[in-house]
Amino acid sequence: GIGLALSLAATAINGTLAIVMLRASRRLRSITLRADAHHLLTDVWTSVGVVVGVILIPTTGWLILDPIIALVVAANIVWAGLRLLRETGMGLLDTALPAEERQIVADTLQPFEAEGIQFHALRTRVAGARRFVSVHVLVPGSWTVKQGHDLCEVIELAIARSLPGTFIFTHLEPSEDPVSWADQSLER
């Protein structure tokens, strides 16, 4: 009676807290917060499994439910752990931004391309919770340094607005110079 009610109340509180923490972990891009939320969720599923077992086994008389529920709960814990290990491992490695975020960068650069500005050597990476974008900006060689710099500031601001919290590096080059086109690959 009372013990079961307290267990359900604690489970509801933990479930609510886990959902709030998961949302915050996405917003803050925090693997630590995400791991803690998943830990709470495994506690929730364990408690749900216990409550279901306590109610169903005496009601149905099916003793086989106990190990089945335990295996389902254990499988959920293992699955959550493996997902977190993968995410943590990826956080330790430098990887490119996800495809949808790379598309956001491309969409942000597109209006500038329509004005005749060219880009190449676009590189992105994620290191932990930090995102990095590097791009070479090719402008007419007749432009002043100030014109080119002002354009790079506008481009960096546009990318930063599209992907908040991103570190942006622009490299200005004259579009007419063949050397400007020689550094598109990583080998140079």
Image (cartoon, rainbow, N blue to C red):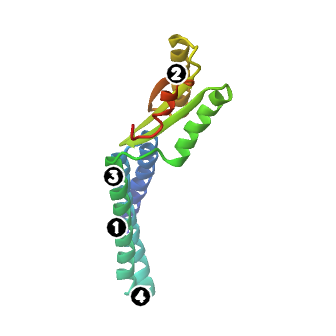
Q: Name the front one of labels 1 and 4.
A: 1
Say which element carries label 4: loop
Q: CA distance from mark 1 to mark 4?
A: 26 Å
Is residue 168 positioned above or below 6 on the image? above
What residue is disc 4 on?
62
The amino acid marked with disc number 4 is Trp
1 or 4: tag closer to the N-terminus: 4
Mark 1 crowdedness (10 Å alpha carbons): few <14, some 14-19, many ≥20 = few
Q: Within the image, what quadrant is residue 112 found in? A: top right
Say which element carries label 1: helix
| Residue shown at 33% from the left, 58% from the top | 85
2 or 3: tag closer to the N-terminus: 3
- Indicate the position of residue 169 as horizontal and vertical percent values: 44, 28
The amino acid marked with disc number 1 is Val
Instruction: Name the residue at the right extreme.
Output: 114
- Indicate the position of residue 20 as horizontal and vertical percent values: 44, 47
- Indicate the position of residue 114 as horizontal and vertical percent values: 68, 29
1 or 2: tag closer to the N-terminus: 1
Q: Nearer the viewer, residue 163 or 103?
A: 103
What residue is disc 2 on?
152
2 or 4: tag closer to the N-terminus: 4
| Residue shown at 34% from the left, 71% from the top | 74
What residue is disc 3 on?
88
Quadrant including the C terminus:
top left
Q: Name the front one of labels 2 and 4.
A: 2
Q: Nearer the viewer, residue 187 or 60?
A: 187
Q: Are marks 1 and 4 in contact (CB under 8 Å)?
A: no
3 or 4: tag closer to the N-terminus: 4
What residue is disc 1 on?
78
The amino acid marked with disc number 2 is Cys
